[in-house]
Amino acid sequence: MAPSSGARGTARPATTSPHPATANAPLILSGADLVLPTGTVKNGRLIIDGTRITGAAPENAHLVDVTGFTLVPGFVDIHNHGGGGASFTSGTVEDVLKGIHTHRLHGTTTVVASTVTGEMDFLAQRAGLLSELAEQGDLAGIHFEGPFISPCRKGAHSEALLRDPDPADVRKLVDAARGQAKMVTLATELPGGLDSVRLLAELGVIAAIGHTDASYEQTVAAIDAGATVATHLFNAMPPLGHREPGPIAALLEDERITVELINDGTHLHPAALELAFHHAGAERVAFITDAMDAAGFGDGRYMLGPLEVEVSEGVARLVEGGSIAGSTLTLDRAFKRAVTVDRLPVEDVVTAISANPARLLGSYDEVGSLEPGKYADLVLLDSEFDLKGVMRRGEWVVDPQLG
């Protein structure tokens, strides 16, 4: 994706100062509902010392009353192309940092940068830039969405730049990411698809099935070869059929697959989301944004590679053809919708929006739940599940100003 002209600055995004209590002293957040892996604890307390959650309160800890609020772990987004008017695919380092900060303001304390289809040399160059930000802790890694996808299900990707998933090309992008490649989306039915899945599995990189025209049988073969994620399930793949079930049935039924869902009310009908949760269960769902530049920024004209996008009332579509072009979703909105519209249990939403994506990234020992020893990454929600505070590594990104 690329920002539209005139609307994308180059200044480093302003950051909110940490809460005075966390700048020098340990902190106790007391009285909130704590959503833990074991369930919700009423009138709980969370102790933060430096960048970590701890199990015992030091004598100099500052007590903050958060009664009436809900504390959940910071959100983890494994599929995100940008935000705040900035693109992870084509922006400068300052642009990428601006996009990261935009999503942090909406509760996403861990973000993977997703690219879109482009020339191989360009994508390799972008991987080098993004890997530096991952190495210094700003990003949690890189996701390559394209160019190894089906022209039949290309969505908002440039067909002229698509190519078959030759293992040598896949390896080129992974190597360019210098150990920071976390996921590659493939149409695994294309020539080289299964061999590329096997290669990614050997390299410890997630092979995700997406933008695919695969049959049920071809999808099963890809899962057996090592694929473990469904890229935005239902979108950019054949619909579920009663004689030709296609990839959706295979992805939902297999316990080895985690399914991404874009819960913005546009990409999925509520019944489709309910179907996914019913068949996969909360333990196999990962909420994502698939966000593009306009997330947290506003309506207008944007560029998606060489394709022009019109964002109107928060929905991004290609100017030519009208295909949905990513989303303007932020995960705080996805969380609230899941609880208030889809009526999912808060615990299941936390599993899908924090714990499961953290496990996929191999970082669940550091993020994804509110447990002692992990980073103090958290989101404070009010009684309507609106975001009121965000903490990352012990410092407030959004300060709730509670005392």
Image (spheres, grey):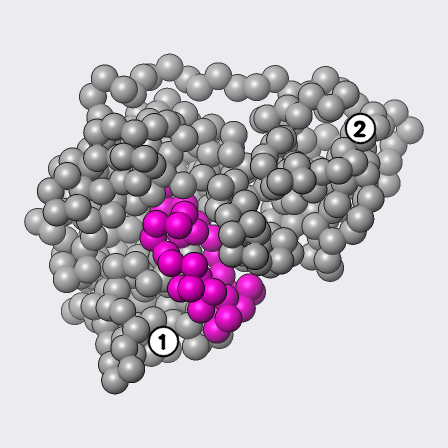
**Side of 163 relative to 231 (left or right):** left
Q: What residue is at 46 percent from the left and 34 percent from the top?
A: 103
Q: At numbered mark 1, what does the secondary structure look like: helix, strand or loop?
A: helix
**How many numbered discs?**
2
For badge 2, the amino acid type reads Val
Residue 152 appears in the rendering: yes
Instruction: Write down the quadrant of residue 55 in the picture.
Output: top right
Q: Whole-percent x and y of residue 3?
A: 25, 28
Instruction: Report the quarter where the N terminus lies.
Output: top left
Structural distance between the alpha carbons of marks 1 and 2: 48 Å
Q: What residue is at 32 percent from the left and 35 percent from the top?
A: 313
Crowding at dot 1, Cα within 10 Å, few <14 / some 14-19 / many 20+, comes out as many
Question: Which range is magenta?
Answer: 262-291
**Side of 382 relative to 238 (left or right):** right
Instruction: Write down the quadrant of residue 28 in the picture.
Output: top right
Q: Nearer the viewer, residue 32 or 5?
A: 32
Return the residue at label 2: 64
Q: What residue is at 26 percent from the left and 64 percent from the top?
A: 237
Instruction: Write down the quadrant of residue 30 in the picture.
Output: top right
Residue 86 appears in the rendering: no
Q: Nearer the viewer, residue 148 or 387?
A: 387
Q: Which mark is residue 249?
A: 1
Crowding at dot 2, Cα within 10 Å, few <14 / some 14-19 / many 20+, comes out as some
Residue 381 among those drawn in magenta = no
